[in-house]
Amino acid sequence: MTATDFNTLSDDEFRLAARAFLADHYPPELRNPVKRLHLPEARRWYEILSREGWIAPGWPREHGGLGLSAAKQLVYLDEYERFGAARLPDSGIVMLGPLILRYGTEEQKQFFLPRIISGEHIWCQGYSEPNAGSDLASLRTEAVLDEERGEWVINGQKIWTTLANDANWIFLLVRTDPSRKKQQGISFLLAPMDAKGVTVRPIVNIDRHDEFCEVFFDDVRVPKANLLGEINDGWNMAKALLGFERVFIGSPRQSGYALARLRRLAEHVGCWNEPSFRDRYVRLALDLADHISLYESFAEQIRRGETLGADVSLLKIHQSELFQRITDLMLEIGGEEAGLLDPIDGDRDLNPAGLFLVARATTIYAGTNEVQRNIIAKNVLNLP
Amino acid sequence: MDERHERAAMIRASAAGIADRSDLRRARGLRYSELGFDRATWREMCGLGWLGLRLPESAGGTGLGTFEACALAETLGAALVPEPLVSAALAVRVLAADARAAALAGDQLVLAAWQEPGVPYFAPPKTVYRDGALHGRKAFVAAARGAGAFVVTASEGVFLVAAGAPGASLTAVPTQDGGHLGTLVLDGAPAVRVAARDEDWQAALDEASLTTAAYLLGLMDAALARTVEYLHTRKQFGVAIGSFQSLQHRAVDVKLQIELTRASVHEAASILDRGAAAPARAAAVSRAKARASEAALFVTRQAVQLHGGVGYTDEHDIGLYLRKAMVVGPSCGMASAHRARWAELNLEAEAAE
C-alpha cells in the first residue's frame, strides 16, 4: 500500500496498517526507552520513517507528509505509543512544520520542509529563558535588524531547550520591539545552530540525562529572510500552535507504561496480592481508565474538527500527576531497591527510581501544572 | 531550656564545621566515589565523640541520651552528610572492648548488617551461625565498601565478621544519592559472637531507626529553608513567586509535615530516654519513622516542584535532598513496615484495655 491512500481506509483498517508498519520497521532494541533518545540512537528510526514516507503524518502529501486527517493522526499516535516506539527529535515535524506551512513564504517552504522530512535539519525550540519560564511573554532575547546588511542580530539566552545538543537549527521567540506591550513585541526567527556566536551548554538533569540545554546567542547574525510570519506576531503564532500538541501531552501512554511497571515491581517485592496494595493499585488503574475516557473525549473533538478549548489543560494536569502518583507508590513499596541508581537486577522493566525521577519533570515542563491551573481558573471557570 | 536542650544545642554548634547546611559542595563532590564518604571526615567525627555518643563513659563514650543523638543526626541530615554514622553507631553498641576502642578511634569502621534480601524488615534473620562460621546473605548495607568489619545478625545471636574474612564476599550497587548499598554473602565466614542480649540489640536497632528519622527531619528542614529562599528570590510576572497564594499554601503543607515529624521524633526520643517499656518504645519509634519516611519524600518532591525547571537539574542542590530521601527514607525499615509494627503494638494494647 502506498502512503497516498490511507485516508480512504476506515480508522480500524488504518490502525491495522499502522500496527503492521511499526512491527515491520521499528528497530526492536529501541522499544520503550525510559529516557528521550539522542539523535545518534534515534537517527536510524528517523531515516526509516523518512524513507517510508511516515515521518510527518500530519503534513500534506505535497510536502512529504502522509496527509492524515486529525482522526487518523490520533489513531497513529495511539498505535505508536502502544508499540513503545521512541519519540524522535521531532520539533521540526510537530512544532515548526505546521507553522511554516501556515505562515512561511514559498521560499521558506521550499527550503526548509524537504530538509525536515529528510532529517538533514534537526530542529530545537527556543522559547523559555532563565527569567521567562511560567512568564514566557517577558522573554528578553532580542533581535535587532541591521538594515544595511539585511540581517537580524540576536543576543540573549534560551534555556530548557530540548535536545539542542542534537539540533542543527533552532526556531526561537525574540523581542523585536521592546516599546510595545510584552506579548506584542515578539517575533519568530529561524537560526542555524552553527552560526557564529551560538553556544550550547547541555544541562544534566536529576535523572543524569542531558535532555535539556542552555543556548546562548552572542551577536548571532541571520538573514532578514529568516523571520517567519509577520514581525511582532511571534506570540500569536506560537500560541496558534498549541492545539494538537496539548492533547498529545495529555496522552495516557506514560501512565499506562508506569502502571504496568508498578505491577512488575509489586510482583518483584511480593506485595502484589496484599489487599492494601491491591486497593491502591486499583484506584490508580481506575484513574487511568477514566483518564483514557477523558482523553478520548478531547480526541473526539479533534475528530469532529473542533478547536480545543482551554479545558484541554485538564489532561496535562491529570496525566502528569497520575504518572507521579504511580511512581510515588513504586517508591513506597520498593524500599531500598527504589533508591538504586540503575534498574534492579539490570532489568529495564524494574526501574522505579528512574521512572520516579522522569515523572518529576512532567509537572514542570510544557507549562507547569501551576500555570495550567491558572489557565483553567481564568479561561474555563472565568474566575476573577 | 532544660539540660538536654542545652546539650543538643552544643552538639549542633560542634557539628557546624562538618555539617554546614548552607554548603553542600563536600556532599556533592563525594557522590559516585568509591567509598561515597570521606575517611578523614569520619575520623574527625569519631574524634568529636559522635560515634560513642550513646555509650557510657566507662565504655569510652560520652553517655548522652537519644534526644542528643537525634539532634546530631538532624544536623547531619540538614547537610546531607554521607558518612555512615547511624549504622556505625548501631554496630559499636554491641562490640567487645578491643573492637570498640578501634572503632571509637576511627581506626576501623564497623557497620551493622542486619537486613536480608526478601526477608520482611521485622522478621527474624535467616542467616545461621554454625561451627564458628556464618552462613547467609545480608543486604542494604550503606557505605559497605568502607567497612573493615560487620556486625551481623543471625538466628543464634549477633556476630562480628571481618570484611576480608574467608567465605565473606561483598558486592555493591550504586544508589541515587551517589553512595552504594552492599550485599554481604557469608559462606562459612568465621565470626565471633558479640556480647549482646537480644533485647539490647533490638533497643539499639530502634534507636538507629529513630536517628534515621531525625536525619530525615534535618534533611526536610533544610530543603524547605532553601525552597522558601527561592520563593523569595525567584521573580515571574514582575513579583516574587512566593507571593502566589497557591505556592504559599503548598509551602505551608510542607511545613506542617515537617513539624509533625519533629514532634513525633522528639516525643519518641523522650520516651526512649525515660526508659519506657519496650512495646511503648517500639511503637513511638515506628510512629516517628513512618512519618519521617513518608514526609521526607513529600517534602523533597514539593521542593523540586517549587523550584520549577531548575529543580530538575543535577547542578542545582535542591535535587540532592530528593535523591538522598529516596535512599535514606527506606533505610532502617520502610514506612509500611513501621506502620504495620505500630498497628500490631497499639491495636493489641487497645484490645487489652
Image: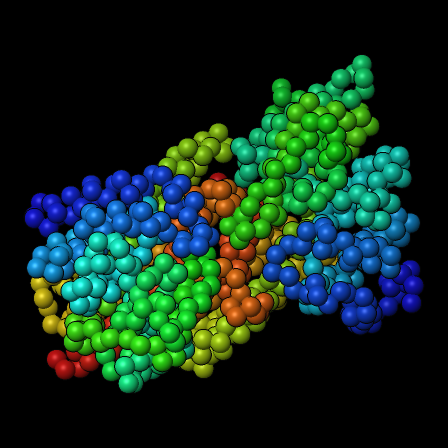
**Image quarter hosting the C terminus of chain B:** bottom left
- Residue B26 falls in which quadrant of the image? top left
Name the residue at 43% across, 44% down.
Answer: B29
Viewer can see residue B165:
yes
Q: Is residue B88 left or right of residue B177?
A: left
Q: Position of residue B331 (x, y in %)?
A: 34, 64
Please name whichever residue, A262 or B59, is drawn nearer the observer in this view of the structure. Answer: B59
Name the residue at 73% across, 27% down.
Answer: A196
Q: Is residue B135 above or below residue B330?
A: below
Please name whichever residue, B32 or A51, is drawn nearer the observer in this view of the structure. Answer: B32
Q: Is residue A208 above or below residue B132?
A: above
Viewer can see residue B284:
no
Name the residue at 31% across, 57% down.
Answer: B84
Q: Position of residue A177 (x, y in %)?
A: 66, 22
Please name whichever residue, A303 or A182, is drawn nearer the observer in this view of the structure. Answer: A182
- Residue B144 falls in which quadrant of the image? bottom left
Q: Is residue A350 left or right of residue B21?
A: right
- Residue reaching furthest to the bottom: B131
- Residue B246 falls in which quadrant of the image? top left
Please name whichever residue, A242 or B143, is drawn nearer the observer in this view of the structure. Answer: B143
Q: Position of residue B162 (x, y in %)?
A: 31, 68
Q: Is residue B150 left or right of residue A370?
A: left
Q: Is residue B116 left or right of residue A238?
A: left
**Image quarter hosting the N terminus of chain B:** top left
Name the residue at 91% across, 49% down.
Answer: A62
Number of numbered discs visible in the structure rendering: 0
Q: Position of residue B193 (x, y in %)?
A: 22, 76
